[in-house]
Amino acid sequence: MGWIETSDGYAVTLDGTQVRCRNAAGRTLRQVPARLRDDAEVVRLRQLTQWLERHEQECRAQADTWLVRSLPVPAGLLARVWPDAAWQAALRDLVVAPVGADGTADMAHAGFLRDADPERGLGVVDLDGDSVRLDGERVLIPHPVLLEDLDDLREFAAELGVEQGVSQLFREVWTKPEELKSGAQEWGAYANARFDQLRHATARAASYGYRVRGGYAVCPLIEAGVPLEAAYWLGDDHPDSEALTGGLEWRGAGGRRLHLREVGRVAWSEGVRMAALVHAGRVVKVDDEEGEL
């Protein structure tokens, strides 16, 4: 972006999401002078930076939603948004796989997204290190719990210098236990976490983008095309009161509690991830004598 002239010989420009200023002698200043803070051009640039920051967050959030919900995405849509720097930063280097007419992702032809062109299609670096173009009208951005040999993929990504704008390969993954009690509808691994105030738990949940409803932190999900949600009990007392977390559950249509054995791999991983993130902010007592947590 070029320099925009303001008053008293100053000029301003946008450097990423920061407003820069230079004086009449052409020297770039460390900060915008106080006299220019209400200048029309400075205000306009600051408003633009706020919009750009919101746009970047929205792009990352949408890409994260596609990943978490395992929703096929039109390749043409990715090609249309690719020229936008914010979209490209969110999408570049995500592992994508072509989706066939039957709705099944072809993981054998998955690769790291490096280009999206309306005419030539999506360009990826495949898992053999070759640059190829994907066929098909839709692609899947798979959740890492669905990726076989995830550790090998992570090593390969490191070799390629992959830096994902949306956490995919290095996202925390929780594998559903093979042995679950028949009829169980609640997972208690993250129950009984104490918070000095309920507001601390709800604020922590909100800081990670989770909604808080009816005393629960809630994570909306889609598993195999079916909508559901994970819900982690935080409490419904006064916000200033002490809180003790409860169990984690999953709900289907109409709020029906699912048996744990019914919960799919992605829904399990994302539900436990939510509970673990909130649980990590609990009050932990220190044993004075042993000096250990």
Image: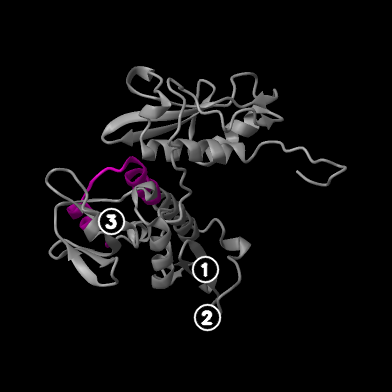
Q: Nearer the viewer, mark 3 or mark 2?
A: 3
User: Do labels 3 and 2 touch, CB within 8 Å?
Assistant: no
Measured Cα–Cα span from mark 1 to mark 3: 38 Å
| For marks 1 and 3 on the same chain, the one whose residue lies earlier in the sequence | 1
Residue 113, compared with residue 145, is above or below; it is below
How would you classify the magenta stretch by its main secondary structure? helix
Residue 128 is inside the magenta segment: no
- Residue type at numbered disc 2: Gly
Q: Judging from the image, what secondary structure is the residue with disc 1 in?
A: strand
Classed neighbour count for the residue bearing mark 2: other residues with Cα under 10 Å, few (<14), some (14–19), many (≥20): few
Measured Cα–Cα span from mark 2 to mark 1: 12 Å
The label on residue 20 is 1
Q: Judging from the image, what secondary structure is the residue with disc 3 in?
A: strand
Question: Where the C terminus falls, by quadrant?
Answer: top right
- Work out which residue is located at the far bottom of the displayed protein and give it: 25
Residue 102, compared with residue 243, is above or below; it is below
Measured Cα–Cα span from mark 3 to mark 2: 47 Å
Residue 268, compared with residue 40, is above or below; it is above
Tell me the colour scheme of the image: one colour
